Image (cartoon, rainbow, N blue to C red):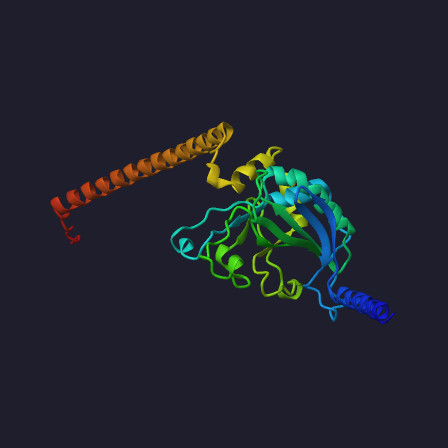
Amino acid sequence: MRTVTALYYLALSLTLAGMSSCALLPNHRVTYDQDDARIGIEDDPTISVKQTEVRNAHPGQLTVEQVRSLLAMIQFTGWSGTVIGIFVSPTPSALLSQEELQKYSTPVTDALKEAGPTERVFFSFPKPGGSYSEDRTSGALFLRGRYLHLVVTDHSSILRPDTGGDNIRVGFERDTKALKLWVAKPAEAAIVPDAEEPKWAPFEKTRISLNYGQTLALLRTVPSNRQGRADLKSAPSSGDAGPSQQDVQEQVRELTNSNRELRERLDDQTKNTKELSEQVDRLRRELDQNKAGKPPARKTPAQ
């Protein structure tokens, strides 16, 4: 009987402890979990309990195509280790491949629509290619005011540093990967005013913001093949495609017109110079004749 009672109280204690710990843990619910990829919603750590006036623009109102277009503009650089980055300047590459954009844009959009005003969307994607790897692309994003804020904590293309068997301190991998985010042209990263800048956590250093309204409007002004051009610019390491034939023809036309204008100006200047030279020669001849001629005789006044 005593054993049963002890087990009862032990189970009750564990249940209460579990409930207490759950109450202390932040909200973290997964909305997409397929093929080792996870997308979900969590409490936004950039919003404190005291900041009652700070709220995210959630549920989000962006479409899948808009989210895909915005994410396609994000680039990154980084390296594995601390020495190589001193000698080599990494080339920006697309944060997400076309396959990842097609696969994850819909669940990310759905999560934004489910998120509340004090929540954000987190993601964790496996390394593309199907083979298992501990390296992943992970981070979080949220809408606030006119901005889309994105923070990246890791990227699957950058290998974990070799520590030679030593224990890895907290944040070591993140620091040595030296991740940095960029925005592909023609868009630009937003300069967020201090009053609107999120209160980022100390370890969330790799982040970037987009004025998503302006960016989407800008993308609408680009020709219909803007997606392909953005992909080329997002992955310069694969080689630049170069300007199109139409662009080359336009540049040749502009250069031809400029050369014609310069030639006409040069002809005008040559003509004016010749006229001025002739005037100077005529004045010089007149001056020489005046010097060589005798002075006119003085007239004798009449008697």
Residue 10: percent from the left, percent from the top?
Answer: 80, 68
Image side of residue 92 versus residue 13, left or right: left
Left or right, residue 133 beside residue 163: right
Q: Residue 118 appears at what percent x and percent y?
A: 75, 60
Q: Which quarter of the rendered picture does the N terminus lie within?
A: bottom right
Query: Residue at the spot x=56%, y=38% of the render?
Result: 231
The answer to which of 203 and 73 lies nearer the viewer is 203
Residue at the extreme right of the image, as rendered: 1
- Please state, as top left, top right, bottom left or bottom right, where the C terminus lies in the image: bottom left
The answer, for residue 148, to whether it is visible in the render is no
Relative depth, front residue between 130 and 184: 130
Q: Give the image quarter of residue 56.
A: bottom right
Q: In front: 265, or 129? A: 129
Indicate the quadrant where residue 266 lies. top left
Whether 283 is drawn above or below 58: the answer is above
Position of 197 with respect to 77 (left or right) is right
Q: Is residue 182 visible?
A: yes
Where residue 131 appears, as percent x and y from the top left, is 57, 40
